[in-house]
Image (tube, grey):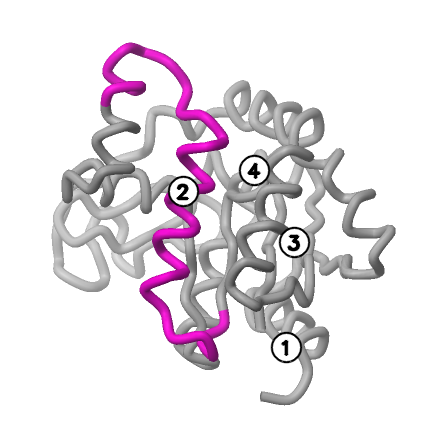
Amino acid sequence: MNIILLGPPGAGKGTQASRLVSERGMVQLSTGDMLRAAVKAGTPVGLKAKAVMDAGELVSDEIVSALIGEALDKLPPETGVIFDGYPRTAAQAESLDAILAERNRTLDHVIELEVNEDALVERITGRFTCANCGEGYHDSFKQPKVEGTCDVCGGTEFKRRPDDNAETVRTRMAEYRAKTAPILPIYEARSLVSRVDGMADIADVNAAIEGILGAR
């Protein structure tokens, strides 16, 4: 089974993908992670990408598509794949169709995690982590049991991502709507799109996705 998980940053795509990986044995292909890994490993595609990024330019669709193809070629054909962060544009959606067809794969589902923008701003701007072990917390939803002390390792230093602020979140949302949302009609025309409430509890979101994917 090959699926695309869509949703703006903070919608919970990573969390849900992790669950599908552990529960269904699927493989998550995140283009950002793959780019970093390819550059680090010095693969032919990675070297191309590094040259482009070093020049301060955006990595082309051609390079990203080559990365996706390279990753799929390493997987057994029966392994299910979750595409995370790709495709982002109509051109990439077209490329993905070709990449899958070349490998006798088809796209089975496109699942969009729908979010409320104001609630998402609260969710993201309230996040912080233990500087020592990385355990995640939240101002409103998950404070340490003992104020100022990590539940897991007992650390007393915490940090926040500098881009976890309201302005950045709203900019990302606008970017998502402008760039990614236009690919939805392509998949809607093929009856592949399902929508899930991304603001629900993690377990409820997972159950909704499992319901869409059906029996294992």
Q: Secondary structure at mark 1?
A: helix
Q: Quadrant of the C terminus?
A: bottom right
- Say few, some or many: other residues with alpha carbon within 10 Å of mark 1 (under 14 / 14 to 19 / 20 or more): some
- Residue at the location (12% across, 48% down)? 132
- Say few, some or many: other residues with alpha carbon within 10 Å of mark 3 (under 14 / 14 to 19 / 20 or more): some
Based on the picture, tell me whether residue 122 belongs to the magenta stretch. Answer: no
Q: Nearer the viewer, residue 157 or 21?
A: 21
- Residue at the location (71% across, 42% down)? 116
- Whole-angstrom CA distance, mark 2 to mark 4, is 37 Å
Q: Which mark is residue 122?
A: 4
Left/right placement of residue 209 relative to residue 58 reads right
In the rendered image, which quarter is residue 169 located in?
A: top right
- Assess whether mark 2 and mark 3 are in contact (beta carbons under 8 angstroms): no
Left/right placement of residue 128 relative to residue 139 reads left
- Whole-angstrom CA distance, mark 1 to mark 2, is 30 Å
Q: Which residue has dot 3 on it?
A: 199
| Farthest-out residue, top | 55
In primary-sequence order, the first of circles 1 and 4 is 4
Q: Which mark is residue 66?
A: 2
Q: Which residue has dot 1 on it?
A: 210
In primary-sequence order, the first of circles 3 and 4 is 4
- Whole-angstrom CA distance, mark 3 to mark 1, is 17 Å
What amino acid type should be assigned to the residue bearing mark 1?
A: Glu
In primary-sequence order, the first of circles 2 and 4 is 2
What amino acid type should be assigned to the residue bearing mark 2?
A: Ala
Q: Which mark is residue 194?
A: none
Please provide the residue range marked out in magenta. Answer: 51-80
- Whole-angstrom CA distance, mark 3 to mark 2, is 34 Å
In primary-sequence order, the first of circles 3 and 2 is 2
Residue 10: image x %, image y %?
Answer: 52, 43
